[in-house]
Image (cartoon, helix red, strand yellow):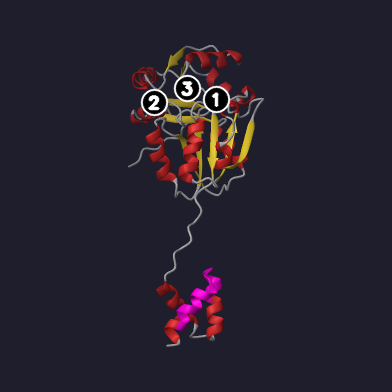
Amino acid sequence: MLKRELNFQGDTPLLYLIATPIGNLEEFSSRAISVLKEMDYVACEDTRNSGLLLKRFGIELPLISCHEHNEEKASERILSLMKEGKKIAYMSDAGYPIISDPGERLARKVLEAGFKVSVVNGPNAGLCAFVCSGIPSKHFYFYGFLESKPSTRKKELESLKDFRDTIIFYESPHRIEDTLKDMVAILGKDRQACLARELTKKHEEFIRGKLAELSELPPDTLIGEMVIVVEGAKEKAKEISDEDIKSYLSEALKERKSKDAIKEISKQYSLPKNRVYDIYLKNWKN
């Protein structure tokens, strides 16, 4: 039977995942500040960056370094402290932990230990770019960073080229030029896209256009971490064989004169009228 316990009730230790500003510090929520003030420790991706953020809001707590390269070891220390009853929150440098940031292994170990995890919401670069992109929004797929190795990056894009929904990528300034060129070559030059940079900051910019147009932007003007929102692949027109057309005509001719049946099939399936007429002549006029 599944064990159930409300997150904010009971005695089971709970780890808070705190979303942090992606640029504008005014987006650090009052709830995040109040939760952090109740903690005994703050684990963080970068103690220097998180220390400065906490200091700005008058929070002084012991910090635990927990980043990509030491997450396994740091997680064990955090679990040990939680077992002692210590209250701990985790913050990555910008946005949500785990989303293209460290924290996944920590959260998984906490859950495997039978403890609880909760989140304090805040900014997310991918969603900020997505809602301002003008790209179809009914469905979307967050991909994050492509691999830096060119051959691997191209294979990743190949696997996504027929994906029908909007895709959200992250990219860094030193790779943006090559990534955009690869996108043009693999996803197609006419694919609509939006490049967002410096989100929530003074020089925030959204550049909307076709991938080919974005790939021609001067690289030295693309500064800061970037989000690329790319529309999904268009539905490919179904290949209609002569046998298909013959079948459609056969059904239509049961209720319509030949002229009307040919016209209807041509319009319904966006087919050249001459092609439909030729198939009619071949099968019904011999």
The spot of residue 227 in percent (x, y) is 54, 34
Residue tagged by mark 2? 106
**Three-letter amino acid code at the position of disc 1:** Thr
Label ID, residue 89: 3
**In whole angstroms, how far apart are the C-alphas of marks 3 and 1?**
12 Å
Residue tagged by mark 1? 20
Q: Which residue lies furthest to the right in this view?
A: 202
**In whole angstroms, how far apart are the C-alphas of marks 1 and 2?**
17 Å
Residue drawn at x 60%, y 24% as measured from the top left: 23
Magenta segment: 265-281
Q: Establish if 275 lies above or below 126.
A: below
Nearer the observer: mark 3 or 2; the answer is 2
Residue drawn at x 49%, y 76% as measured from the top left: 276
- Secondary structure at numbered mark 1: loop
Per the picture, the main secondary structure of the magenta-coloured stretch is helix
Residue 174 inside the magenta-drawn segment: no
Nearer the observer: mark 3 or 1; the answer is 1
Residue 266 inside the magenta-drawn segment: yes
Label ID, residue 42: none
| Quadrant for the N terminus in the image | top left
State if disc 1 and disc 3 touch (CB < 8 Å): no
Is residue 9 at all visible to an observer of this figure? no
The spot of residue 73 in percent (x, y) is 34, 18
Residue 65, quarter of picture: top left
**Three-letter amino acid code at the position of disc 2:** Leu
| Quadrant for the C terminus in the image | bottom left
Q: Establish if 169 lies above or below 267.
A: above
